[in-house]
Amino acid sequence: MGLNFEDINGQTPIEEEEKEGLLISSIATLAELNEYEQQNIEDALQWLIHRKLKAETIFSEKFICLLHRRMYGSIWSWAGQFRKTDKNLGINKWQIPVALKSLCEDAQFWVKNDTYPPDEVAIRFKHRLVSIHCFPNGNGRHSRMMADVIITKVYQLQPFTWGTAHLIEQSNSRADYLKAVKTADQNEFEKLLHFARS
């Protein structure tokens, strides 16, 4: 297969066996892959718009995997399936189902008991989800979309802007996002909460 693209800082490398799951044989560059993935993600957003979703549906392995499949299913054969390899990020592959179940149970508790304000529930969930790193690729975008699903469907609030509110400064957007995620790794969520609404 002719797929050979450079990994951007902070992205999970795609293993050779995972590259074999590419469903569109004409894709040869990262730019082409991003274009196809973006179209698939926009289709997933359209699918979500008119769906009424309860917290117990959203906070489930079934929905989390379904959303990943909706976002990447026309590009990758493994979309919506837990990764079978260990990565430079995330927990050991065999720990994924238990960690995800624990996260979903925690999130349902947070919502039911108003443990955190709405934005913080969504951002804490997003952060832990990306830390688990359930899938071979697309975990960052998937976790951000999960946060948007939580904030719009559970709390009926506006989706996050994820650093796009100031388009002129967007060149620093990815670096700011990665810094905010690293700060959240230390259990300090202010920067990530601010970035999500910037």
Image (spheres, rainbow, N blue to C red):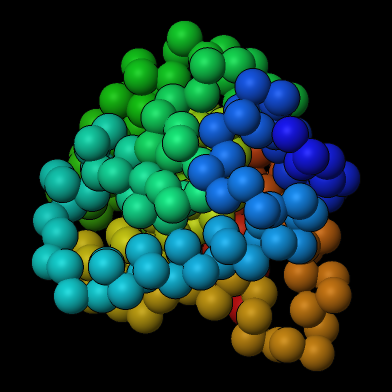
Q: Is residue 71 above or below residue 62?
A: below
**Quadrant of the rendered image containing residue 168:** bottom right
Q: 90 or 189: nearer the eye?
A: 90
Q: Position of residue 56 (x, y in %)?
A: 14, 45
For the point 17% across and 52% down, the residue is 55
Count the marks: 0
**Is residue 52 left or right of 44 when viewed as pictured?**
left
Q: Residue 73: give x, y in percent of width and height.
A: 41, 48
Question: Which residue is at a point 21% across and 63% down the rendered structure image?
Answer: 154
Which is nearer the eye, 8 or 110?
Answer: 8
Tell me if 179 is positioned left or right of 196 in this view: right
State the image coordinates of residue 8 (x, y, percent, origin top left). Answer: 83, 49
Is 179 placed above or below 169 here? above
Residue 188 placement, left or right of 178: left
Which quarter of the image is occupied by the N terminus? top right
Relative to 147, say whether 185 is above or below: above
